Image (tube, grey):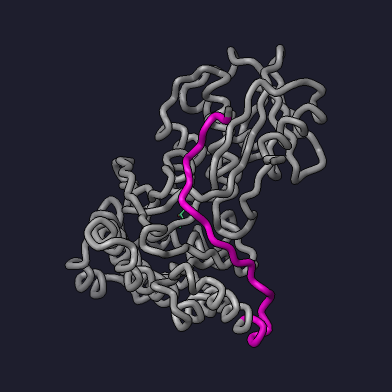
């Protein structure tokens, strides 16, 4: 089989005229539940998916970094000495931002050798499946190995997040890189974003006869602009007004006081985060005690909260969720940062095509662009490929 790992080795050779010294890969992720809770030091439950970014890397004998990819024509080049977030732009800010961020986490960039990197990926871009975190995690793991830095995976997740925050300019949390680096087959990563304690939670979809369908609406979104940062700022305002370090420190019992103290919009932003944290905890408990067929209502409630309180859904996402719910899904919700991207539906395996046909029909009826739909499975985290 001509696998993406063989393709990337060949492409590395074409671009740089020599063999790569190794190939590393990292998956995209889907978030099962726990949205906009990570930067509020709350709980998330994402899983790594069976779509990966692959990075072939070769050491150089100077201090130049070069990155090429299957999705851009040019080879970006910079010397290690010039590496700052301001010097980076475009797609190469993801891999080169990681090299810079490793320096912020202790790598001596004056002492390590330059590298050539070639990146390929089958993680859909713009679908809310963390194609960017997959690049960051693959490159972070690769450079950690070839530069012999010895950083652990939690630190590598922070490296990826720092690259995203400073080099790319998106004020995102730690969830996506953590899922990509810590994922395990058939399991979700239950992450406490305050302590960064991660627990593997078996999903059991297969055994329960369920499939997780991604419905990519094709509505473009970006976390570097607008809505994402505004929501984050509203959460910080809410926490300050409530006198707590972060919204993680509030529970459902605090909501009546929050409603008295905060304006309506800030209150609803706060209510989403507080109730979503509780839903993550409830989902983990339900998965363990009753299995995945029992988590549907929690998924549905999460979507309603994002639509009505956090206001980050769009009509296409609402239609995908409602149509899935009306056509036999156990539960459905938008996933990721919102304002576009994808919804997920947890569906009995034999009902997958019925739901796909129904969603296609509903989108056509509303004159929305045709969505992309596919099943994902929970896969392994970032690794050095054989
Ligand atoms: C995006 C961000 F990158 C994550 O950190 C997280 O905040 C998510 O949106 C919303 O839950 O994926």
Q: Quadrant of the N terminus?
A: top right
> Residue at coordinates 37% horizontally, 47% vertically from top-left?
189
> Residue at coordinates 75% horizontally, 46% vertically from top-left?
71
> Residue at coordinates 72% horizontally, 40% vertically from top-left?
2
For this orientation, the residue located farthest to the bottom is: 365
- The spot of residue 114 in percent (x, y) is 67, 19
* 163 lies above or below 258: above
> Residue at coordinates 43% horizontally, 67% vertically from top-left?
346
Exactly how many numbered labels are in the figure?
0
Asked whether the viewer can see residue 242, the reply is no
Is residue 279 located in the magenta-colored stretch of the structure? no
- The spot of residue 89 in percent (x, y) is 69, 42
Is residue 383 located in the magenta-colored stretch of the structure? yes
Q: Quadrant of the C terminus?
A: top right
* 103 lies above or below 137: above
Q: What stretch is highlighted in magenta?
A: 363-385
- The spot of residue 274 in percent (x, y) is 29, 63
- The spot of residue 221 in percent (x, y) is 60, 62
* 45 lies above or below 381: below
Would residue 240 appear left or right of 159 to someone viewing this image? left
């Amino acid at each position: 089989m001509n696998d993406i790992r063989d393709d990337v080795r060949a492409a590395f050779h074409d671009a740089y005229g020599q063999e790569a010294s190794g190939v590393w890969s990292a998956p995209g992720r889907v978030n099962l539940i726990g949205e906009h809770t990570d930067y509020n030091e709350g709980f998330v439950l994402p899983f790594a998916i069976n779509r990966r970014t692959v990075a072939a890397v070769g050491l150089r004998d100077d201090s130049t970094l070069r990155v090429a990819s299957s999705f851009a024509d040019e080879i970006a080049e910079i010397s290690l000495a010039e590496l700052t977030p301001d010097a980076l732009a475009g797609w190469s800010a993801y891999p080169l931002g990681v090299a810079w961020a490793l320096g912020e986490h202790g790598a001596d960039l004056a002492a390590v050798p330059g590298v050539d990197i070639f990146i390929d990926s089958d993680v859909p871009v713009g679908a809310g499946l963390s194609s960017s975190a997959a690049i960051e995690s693959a490159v972070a793991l690769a450079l950690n190995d070839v530069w012999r830095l010895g950083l652990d995976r939690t630190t590598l997740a922070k490296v990826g997040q720092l690259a995203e925050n400073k080099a790319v300019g998106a004020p995102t949390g730690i969830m996506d890189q953590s899922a990509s680096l810590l994922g395990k087959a058939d399991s979700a990563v239950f992450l406490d974003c305050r302590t960064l304690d991660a627990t593997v939670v078996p999903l059991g979809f297969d055994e329960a006869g369920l499939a997780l369908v991604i419905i990519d609406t094709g509505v473009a979104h970006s976390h570097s602009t607008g809505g994402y940062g505004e929501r984050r700022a509203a959460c910080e305002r809410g926490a300050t007004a409530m006198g707590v370090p972060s919204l993680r420190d509030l529970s459902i019992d605090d909501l009546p006081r929050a409603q008295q103290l905060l304006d309506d919009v800030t209150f609803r932003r706060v209510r989403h985060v507080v109730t979503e944290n509780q839903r993550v905890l409830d989902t983990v408990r339900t998965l363990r005690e009753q299995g995945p067929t029992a988590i549907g209502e929690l998924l549905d409630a999460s979507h309603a909260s994002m639509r009505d309180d956090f206001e980050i859904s769009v009509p296409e996402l609402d239609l995908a969720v409602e149509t899935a719910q009306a056509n036999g899904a156990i539960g459905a919700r938008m996933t990721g940062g919102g304002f576009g991207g994808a919804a997920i539906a947890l569906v009995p395996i034999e009902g997958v095509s019925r739901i796909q046909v129904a969603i296609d029909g509903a989108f056509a009826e509303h004159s929305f662009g045709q969505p992309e739909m596919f099943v994902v499975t929970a896969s392994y985290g970032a690794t050095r490929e054989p």
